Image (tube, coloured by chain):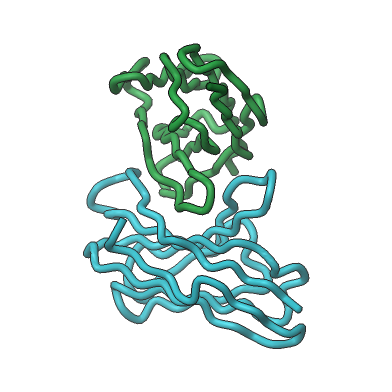
């Protein structure tokens, strides 16, 4: 099955700086790559996703890039704010709808 | 955040007991999922169902059972055969087969503690 690795496990950034989280996947058939944000005590929520026919997608301060050849994808958060502090999960799936999640990255934005 | 609910929020169980976690959605989604979340391990798939009366094992199905008799409901039973059941359990739903792989909407979760 699919195996997703996520790095780093923790990330501390100064407010206003950028944050980058990287994930690699093993199954070349994977074609959907979502990113979820989970604030403390709350449920995971989708923040951005990308499909394999697109190399980059941006939504305001958040962007995701995908390199199918190298089988890795990254989340970029620019101009970080305190409300960006949370755990972020990457995931990947081929066509059978079984999302395989990375272990998560705890992001702390220092004021 | 409405649309998918889980109950109870907290659940305590004695060793050797089976317990059932509830998951209900009113989003008219075909697909439903159960995940287990442990610190530092992300979300691991227990079972999933793409349509009523059908479900498949995920990566860690041993010691768990499910049913999908109604489109809106996907209860999870944690049996006494599950060696380490203390965890945070999340239910999710998505549009399913008609929409292709897409956003999964999560419930608020149930925290199960085995005493």
Q: Is residue B56 left or right of residue B111?
A: left
Residue B4 percent across, percent down from the top left: 33, 64
Residue at horizontal 32 percent and vertical 22 percent from the top: A53
**Pick the front one: A67 or B27:** B27
- Which chain identifier belongs to the green chain? A
**Pick the front one: A28 or A23:** A23
Q: Is residue A100 left or right of residue A61?
A: right
Quick one: which residue is furthest to the top in this view? A17
> In the picture, residue B71 is in which quadrant?
bottom left
Quick one: which residue is furthest to the front in this view? A111
Residue at horizontal 29 percent and vertical 23 percent from the top: A59
Residue B93 percent across, percent down from the top left: 36, 58
What's the colour of chain B in the image? cyan
Residue B17 percent across, percent down from the top left: 69, 87
Residue A45 percent across, percent down from the top left: 40, 45
Residue at horizontal 60 percent and vertical 30 percent from the top: A26
Q: Is residue A21 left or right of residue A42?
A: right
**Pick the front one: A97 or B42:** B42
């Amino acid at each position: 099955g699919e195996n997703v690795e996520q790095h780093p496990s923790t990330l501390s950034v100064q407010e206003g700086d950028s944050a980058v989280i990287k994930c690699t996947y093993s199954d070349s058939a994977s074609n959907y790559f979502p990113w979820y944000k989970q604030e403390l005590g709350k449920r995971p929520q989708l923040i951005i996703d990308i499909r394999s026919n697109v190399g980059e997608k941006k939504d305001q301060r958040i962007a995701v890039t995908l390199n199918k050849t190298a089988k890795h994808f990254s989340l970029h958060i620019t101009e970080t704010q305190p409300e960006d502090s949370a755990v972020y999960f990457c995931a990947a799936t081929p066509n059978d709808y079984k999302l395989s999640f990375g272990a998560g990255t705890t992001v702390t934005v220092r004021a | 955040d409405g649309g998918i609910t889980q109950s109870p929020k907290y659940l305590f169980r004695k060793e050797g007991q089976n317990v059932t976690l509830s998951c209900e959605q009113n989003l008219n989604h075909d697909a439903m999922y159960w995940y287990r979340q442990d610190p530092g391990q992300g979300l691991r798939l227990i079972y999933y169902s793409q349509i009523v009366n059908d479900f498949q094992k995920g990566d860690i199905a041993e010691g768990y059972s499910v049913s999908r008799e109604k489109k809106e409901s996907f209860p999870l039973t944690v049996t006494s055969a599950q060696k380490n059941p203390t965890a945070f359990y999340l239910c999710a739903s998505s549009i399913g087969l008609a929409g292709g792989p897409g956003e999964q909407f999560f419930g608020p979760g149930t925290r199960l503690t085995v005493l």
